[in-house]
Amino acid sequence: MEQVTWKHRICLLLGIAFAVVAGGARAQSSAREIVDVREIMPDLAIDSRYGTEDNFLQQKLYSADSSRSYLLLGAVLALRDVRSDLNELGFDIKVWDGYRPRSVQYLMWEILPDPRFVANPATGSNHNRGAAIDVTLLDLATGEELDMGTGFDDFTDVAGHGYVDLPLEVRIRRARLKSAMDAHEFSSLFSEWWHYSFNLASGFPLKDYQTK
């Protein structure tokens, strides 16, 4: 199993390197660069909740258009592979959040200084590295958002991966999403079924890149 894991890591890194060399406008990019997700996946469904008032803080926190999201290039390329796998199962994905400027993290902490719900900006969040993404599933045929048991930023036990008192189809969807993300170097957060961090960005610096 360890050999398979390292083989997959090497293949992913080689894929990132190839995309960087062959990617035209991305030719000078590195896996650590923050990029517009739509540059890689123009048709990806994005509903950036912090770019609207439809979030638990009920405030628009991002200046960027809510139909845009940003992430490390390496994470975007891995997410593209996740999406391909899910498409084969009849699913697609929608992004709720990606890169979050550290200045926004300070603002969130000022509004709700509770580490149960908001990462302390002193240590930061993987979102501040461009290495975390919040996603949900869509029906590939219809584009409709599927029931995953809770909505985004639900802070109850129902949102956790360990919660099992859910309809079978909801549990299957959560498992499908987690399996696809796990297979492409994303790790889950036990308390939030929608939140995943890109493993290969461990230790990357916190950023305050201002999106447009």
Image: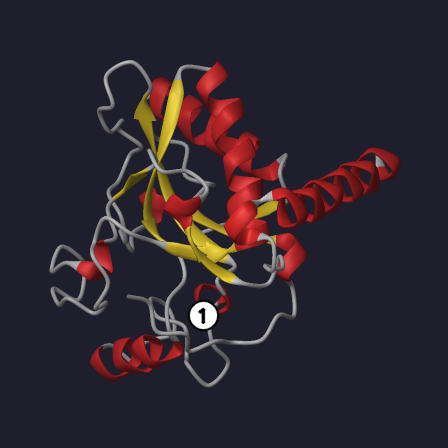
Which one is nearer the viewer's eye here, 189 or 42?
A: 42
Q: Quadrant where the N terminus lies?
A: top right
Q: Is residue 117 above or below residue 200?
A: below
Q: Is residue 58 visible?
A: yes
Which one is nearer the viewer's eye here, 107 or 83?
A: 83
Q: Is residue 180 above or below residue 103?
A: above
- Residue 166 percent location from the top left of the image: 33, 28
**Which residue reaches farthest right?**
3
Q: Secondary structure at mark 1?
A: helix
- How many residues crowd mark 1 within 10 Å: few (<14), some (14–19), many (20+)? many
Residue wearing tag 1? 128
Q: Residue at x 82, y 33 (%)?
A: 4
Q: Is residue 35 above or below residue 42?
A: below
Give amino acid for label 1. Answer: Asn
111 horizontally vs 16: left or right = left
- Residue 204 percent location from the top left of the image: 62, 70
Which one is nearer the viewer's eye here, 25 or 99?
A: 25
**Which residue reaches farthest front?**
24
114 horizontally vs 26: left or right = left
Q: Quadrant where the C terminus lies?
A: bottom left
What colour scheme governs how the chains and residues are painted in the rendered image of this protein? secondary structure
Q: Residue at x 41, y 79 (%)?
A: 120
Q: Residue at x 39, y 77 (%)?
A: 102
32 horizontally vs 86: left or right = right
Q: Residue at x 15, y 66 (%)?
A: 60
